[in-house]
Amino acid sequence: MNNFVYYAPTQVIFGKNAEAELGNLVKDLNCKKILIHYGGRSAEKTGVLNKVAKAVEDAGIAYVKLGGVVPNPHLSLVYEGIELCKKEGVDFILAVGGGSVIDSAKAIGYGAANEGDVWELYNGKRKPDACLPIGVVLTIAAAGSEMSNSSVLTKEDEGLKLSCNTNLARPKFAVMNPEFTLTLPDYQTSCGCTDIFLHTAERYFTSNGNMSITDSIAEALMRTVIKFAKVLRKQPDNYEARAEVMWAGSLSHNGLTGCGNKRNDMATHMMEHEVGGMFDVAHGAGLAALWGSWARYVYKDCLGRFVKFAVEVMGIEDGEDKEAVALKGIEAVEEFYRYMGMPTSLKELGISPTEEQIKKMAHLCSLACGGTNGSAKALNEEDMVKIYHMAM
Ligand code: NZQ
Ligand code: ZN
């Protein structure tokens, strides 16, 4: 095992009517003015936004609102939010939505608390010293941003999608009522389950140095997500399944399922961010489209882990021919994606990048990773080109 730091400071309020605690939570933070930040239409349509605004009002705290966050959130709205926060004296941001809204809130929080262009915190030119405190009312189980250190932002005019990862932006609290996710379209539910599954899978495929306890937690989490994602495919109104998936989403990306591992892999994630930046696809679907190709490209370099995964997570029978077992595990994951209505290639995702676009994505990805990326196998730019090709 490797030494590790586990830091998960977010207070989680989970379950039916969890939002009833919102007033107390914001009062305890002694803030003067809140920015309520939200997305396109869903928070308004479902009534969640009204509930949140009323809770803040009842707590006697002033607020301003800024909606309009799109999936793969845009830098331009972040600039608008930063201006608004400065003008209004906002000292707390409440994100009502999913990964995109939370990440946009984190970016606004950075921009309002640091001098200079916030994008420079994402393109690696500078590091942030502070972030306005963030609270979350989660409406989709997926990205895990409600407990993560990460914010992923798109500079839409250049098609660049980059992240800024610091503990400064970890939310103070996350209100999670699984009922809020009952209104999700099936496609978004499936995208979310794919992302949750892969946040742990990407921590699992490491070259060596794994703890048994972390493996056991990770395997249980992945089995649980598969089980309840399938339930939701047939019964989207199943509250228990919504709750299982929602909690898995937070645990899958708050660091727990990687403790003691020799680095996380995250290569599929990094390669997907380029696809999302260039083609504006849903994150989970982009991951599903790439993962099988990544897995087939790297499995021989990490055979023991792929065999363990196949047996412990996907229920494949172990055998003499270890490569065959590993490949069956990969096929079983793709079968799961197909069951969930997810793509297993870029074509099925609905995009066909040109050679030039593939090279650009690989180049930007390797730059974003500082040259190479991956723990199961360290991938350079050339490897990434090959994987994008395989995924066509
Ligand atoms: O915009 P609205 O109308 O709200 O619709 C949203 C959006 O279209 C809809 N939605 C959300 N809650 C709903 C709902 N529709 C009906 N009922 C509800 N209760 O769902 C759509 C997707 O929302 P989004 O926030 O984009 O989804 P997700 O949580 O998957 O976030 C994706 C973003 O997070 C980033 C991704 O790259 C992507 O930009 N990630 C962030 C991470 C982090 N910060 O730690 C890690 C992840 O790996 C990921 O990269
Ligand atoms: Zn993800």
Image (cartoon, grey):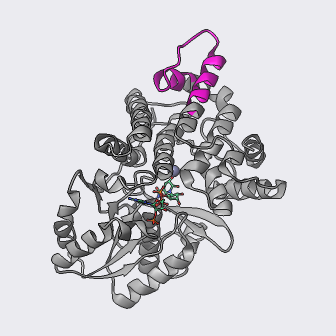
How many numbered marks appear? 0
Residue 95, percent from left and from top: 37, 68
Q: Is residue 254 above or below residue 100?
A: above
Residue 175 makes an appearance in the image: yes
The structure residue drawn at horizontal position 43% and vertical position 70%, both measured from the top left corner, is 41
Q: Is residue 104 magenta?
A: no
Q: Can you say whether 27 is above or below 172 in the image?
A: below
The residue nearer to you, when weighing 208 against 292, is 292
Q: Main secondary structure of the magenta part?
A: helix
Spot the residue most to the top: 320
Measuring from the top left, give residue 1's x and y in whole percent: 45, 32
Residue appearing at x 55%, y 62% in the figure: 163
In the rendered view, tell whether residue 322 sits above or below residue 77: above
The spot of residue 319 in percent (x, y) is 58, 10
Q: Position of residue 200 (x, y in %)?
A: 47, 40
Can residue 131 be seen from the camera position used here? no
Outermost right residue: 355
Q: Is residue 216 left or right of residue 210?
A: left
**Considering depth in this image, is 259 or 347 the residue closer to the camera?**
347
For the record, the magenta segment spans 307-333
- Residue 96, located in which quarter of the rendered image? bottom left
Q: Is residue 168 left or right of residue 267?
A: left
- Residue 344, relative to residue 333: is it above or below? below
Residue at 64% over, 36% down: 292
Q: Quadrant of residue 265?
A: top right
Image quarter where the C terminus lies is top right
Q: Quadrant of residue 233?
A: top left
